[in-house]
């Protein structure tokens, strides 16, 4: 075996080992700031590359061109949080490339960026941004071990002496021929719009060179973007990189992507409830007219009525209006019952037809708990099979929570925040376990005393949207005073709901009048 053949054999082994190492999946991390390559000693130029056979040369011998050596990111989800374009683009290049025979470096501003992006795509090369030749830029370029560097919009003189053994050129024809690297087809890159953002333009070019999939989106939560949800559900990526601090922390991004990959969306679109939709609900119990409008007609007529009521809000809303049922699942009653709880627990089988028909009609469903002396958590768990459905949420009606020795209708009930938080944590865990869209938790309130310690409500669960729902009835000045008190006393990071009573309001607000409330309700119910 001659020397040249041994060198080729050793190079193939090196490339194969590097590619296998790059495929290893590890835990979730956050990558922010300058990569380790930027502070390491400068490696020798001309490192291990992939290779690709192109057209045959003289005497029918194939011609080999070099290709970059890509790698899947070392985490199932990572976030590049640095806002500086030079640092961000260097980090991103190192996340996708082990080596690259060509690196393109462009000025952060000016008209050269489009040409640089085009050149990077043509050369299958990463694109870095820089305002000048800094030690960090030199380290980032050298870390990719290129044979040649194309400068676009930057003076050539500063780099050659600092990159020994690497050709620095200013024109595309001076670059060596390069092949297509092994594509990272199961890597998704989440980023905002490239418009007026040079760093994102460079990221897009590098992602294209590496064969990764760009998913453009507004904001940092893929669950809130129906288009991003569809893209992630199709791709089912093995690794995701969020470009921008808005995507962090990485563990949260991993959880959100896991939900997005299911493709299941809420009525009205997306997987985040608010402020992306307005729920308009009929409240009550099936077959019981005295408990609200929901029970005044059969199931088919209730669906039709809910849609009619919701339709009045569509011309008034900037977001989709979703009709809903709020079904009293556990009903406060005068007699204690066999379990002495003063609360009738409707069988799941009785509620399932209503939930199923609502889902088929594009509606949301809220299961309301009037717990009496029962544990709120225990009652919520009775309906776990229904709450595992993406269009079903939960409500707590503290008015009907009884303390030891109390009986219904003799006082206004109350609940301690610790008991509420136990439901919060259980419901959030259930939602996360089954990778469900964000789930609704409604807290009914018309007196501040109904929720003891309300300021300690845990609103940190990313899988829940919590609505404090004002249930006051009477004259409109009375209701407005209650609304002001409830909205002022609520903790941060909650939304608000309003209830219209068909009989007990004097007068009941029209849909247009209801939509003048501040803050704007995200849920409006009718009883």
Image (cartoon, rainbow, N blue to C red):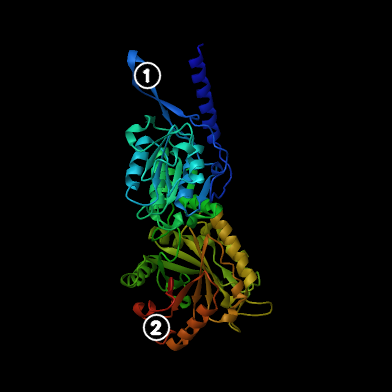
Q: Residues within 10 Å of mark 1 (few under 14, many from 20)?
A: few
Q: Which residue is mark 2?
A: 508
| Mark 2 to mark 1 CA distance (whole Å) | 83 Å
Q: Quadrant of residue 409?
A: bottom right
Q: Nearer the viewer, residue 461 or 176?
A: 176
Identify which residue is drawn at 41% across, 50% down: 199
Vertical relation: 260 (above or below) 363: above
Quadrant where the image shows the C terminus: bottom left
Identify which residue is drawn at 42% across, 55% down: 265
On the rendered structure, is 52 left or right of 135?
Answer: left
Res. 509 mark = none
Res. 62 mark = 1
Would residue 475 be visible to someone looking at this image? no
Vertical relation: 83 (above or below) 37: below
Would residue 457 be visible to someone looking at this image? yes
Q: Position of residue 509 (x, y in %)?
A: 38, 82
Q: Position of residue 270 (x, y in %)?
A: 42, 57
SS type, badge 2: loop
Q: Nearer the viewer, residue 446 or 16?
A: 16
SS type, badge 1: strand
Vertical relation: 62 (above or below) 403: above
Q: Quadrant of residue 356?
A: bottom left
On the rendered structure, is 387 left or right of 405?
Answer: left
Q: Position of residue 292 (x, y in %)?
A: 45, 76
Identify which residue is drawn at 33% across, 73% down: 316
Q: Nearer the viewer, mark 2 or mark 1?
A: 1
**Residue farthest to the right, as pictured:** 404
Q: Residues within 10 Å of mark 2 (few under 14, many from 20)?
A: some
Q: Nearer the viewer, residue 432 or 114?
A: 114
Mark 2 vs 1, N-terminal side: 1
Q: Position of residue 52 (x, y in %)?
A: 40, 26
């Amino acid at each position: 075996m001659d020397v040249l053949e041994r060198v080729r054999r050793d190079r193939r082994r090196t490339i194969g080992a590097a590619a296998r190492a790059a495929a290893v999946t590890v835990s979730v991390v956050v990558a922010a700031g300058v990569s380790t390559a930027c502070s390491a000693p400068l490696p020798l130029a001309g490192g291990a590359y992939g290779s690709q056979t192109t057209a045959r040369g003289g005497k029918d011998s194939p011609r080999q061109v070099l290709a970059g050596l890509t790698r899947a990111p070392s985490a199932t989800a990572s976030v590049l949080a640095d806002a500086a374009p030079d640092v961000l683009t260097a980090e991103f290049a190192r996340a996708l490339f082990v080596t690259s025979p060509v690196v393109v470096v462009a000025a952060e501003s000016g008209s050269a960026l489009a040409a640089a992006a085009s050149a990077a795509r043509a050369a299958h090369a990463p694109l870095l941004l820089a305002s000048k030749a800094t030690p960090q830029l030199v380290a980032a370029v050298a870390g990719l071990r290129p044979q040649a560097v194309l400068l676009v919009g930057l003076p050539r003189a500063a780099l050659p002496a600092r990159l020994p053994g690497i050709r620095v050129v200013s024109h595309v024809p001076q670059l060596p021929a390069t092949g297509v690297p092994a594509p990272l087809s199961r890597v998704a890159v989440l980023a905002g719009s490239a418009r007026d953002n040079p760093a994102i333009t460079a990221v897009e070019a590098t992602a294209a060179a590496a064969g990764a999939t760009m998913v453009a989106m507004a904001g940092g939560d893929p669950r809130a973007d129906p288009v991003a949800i569809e893209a992630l559900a199709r791709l089912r990526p093995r690794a995701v990189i969020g470009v921008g601090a808005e995507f962090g922390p990485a563990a949260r991004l991993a959880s959100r992507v896991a939900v997005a990959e299911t493709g299941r969306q809420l009525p009205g679109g997306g997987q985040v409830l608010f402020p992306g939709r307005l729920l308009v609900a009929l409240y009550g119990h099936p077959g019981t007219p005295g408990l609200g409008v929901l029970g005044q007609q059969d199931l088919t007529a209730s669906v039709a009525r809910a849609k009619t009521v919701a339709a009045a809000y569509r011309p008034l809303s900037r977001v989709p209006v979703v009709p809903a049922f709020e079904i009293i699942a556990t009903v406060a009653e005068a007699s204690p019952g066999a379990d002495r709880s003063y609360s009738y627990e409707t069988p799941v089988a009785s509620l399932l037809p209503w939930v199923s028909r609502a889902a088929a009609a594009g509606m949301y469903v809220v299961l309301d708990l009037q717990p009496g002396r029962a544990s709120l958590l225990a009652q919520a768990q009775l309906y776990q099979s229904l709450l595992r459905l993406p269009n079903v949420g939960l409500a707590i009606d503290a008015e009907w929570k009884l303390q030891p020795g109390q009986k219904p209708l003799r006082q206004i009930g109350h609940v301690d925040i610790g008991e509420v938080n136990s439901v919060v944590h259980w419901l959030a865990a259930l939602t996360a376990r089954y990778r469900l869209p964000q789930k609704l938790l409604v807290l009914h309130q018309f007196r501040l005393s109904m929720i003891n310690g309300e300021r300690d409500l845990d609103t940190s669960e990313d899988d829940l949207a919590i609505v404090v729902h004002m249930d006051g009835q009477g004259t409109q000045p009375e209701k407005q005073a209650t609304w002001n008190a409830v909205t002022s006393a609520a903790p941060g990071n909650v939304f608000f709901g309003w209830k219209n009573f068909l009989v007990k309001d004097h007068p009941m607000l029209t849909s247009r009048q209801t939509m003048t409330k501040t803050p704007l309700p995200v849920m409006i119910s009718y009883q």
